[in-house]
Image: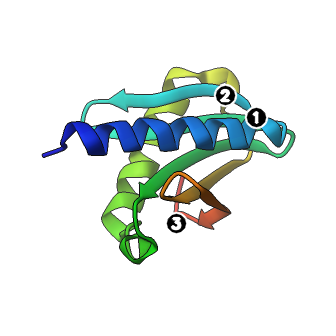
Amino acid sequence: MSTPDTLALGRKGEQLACDFLTERGHQLLARNYRNGRYELDVISLDANGLHFVEVKDRKDADYLDGCITAKKQKNMVAAAHRYIASHAHLSGLDYYFDVIMIVDGQSIDYYPQAFIPIYL
């Protein structure tokens, strides 16, 4: 269960991630996209294609290890499928699954194409 502190940290981290992406030429398409039980933190578009971005913001870098599990990856892919199905004009683009790690609202590490799904 999330506490008000972790929710605020998450919102702050997502805003930092969005600012980071827009500074690098991304157009933000969605934040906190939800479809059923599936969720994507940020969906953006740049010259290379469509990016589905997971944002992890923690107070301590030690908690970042292993936070993008195989289950999380599977759920991100399922959410991406649903997003693409409802936005057919985007279906011909290349797709990327990225991760942005933020520690204590300060350091930002961007991992473009953090994982490649078996199918999409």
Vertical placement of residue 15 versus 101, above or below: above
Residue type, mark 2 in image? Leu
Q: Which residue is nearer to you in this view: 58 or 51?
A: 58
Q: Secondary structure at mark 3?
A: loop
Please name which of the two marks, 3 or 2, marks the residue nearer to the observer: 2
Residue of label 1: 22
Q: Which residue is nearer to you in this view: 89 or 29?
A: 29
Label placed on residue 118: 3
Q: Residues within 10 Å of mark 3 (few under 14, many from 20)?
A: few
Q: How far apart are the two marked residues, 3 and 2, measured between alpha carbons?
A: 25 Å
**Which percent across, then down, holds residue 80?**
49, 41
Label placed on residue 28: 2
**Which percent across, then down, holds residue 97?**
59, 55
In screen coordinates, is 51 left or right of 81?
right
**Which percent across, then down, holds residue 76?**
43, 50
Q: How far apart are the two marked residues, 3 and 1, measured between alpha carbons?
A: 28 Å
Q: Are marks 3 and 1 in contact (CB under 8 Å)?
A: no
Q: Quadrant of residue 11?
A: top left
Q: Secondary structure at mark 1?
A: helix
Compare marks 3 and 1 and give the one earlier in the sequence: 1
Compare marks 2 and 1 and give the one earlier in the sequence: 1
Vertical placement of residue 120 versus 32, above or below: below
Outermost residue on the left side: it is 1
Q: Is residue 50 visible?
A: yes
Q: Which residue is nearer to you in this view: 66 or 107?
A: 107
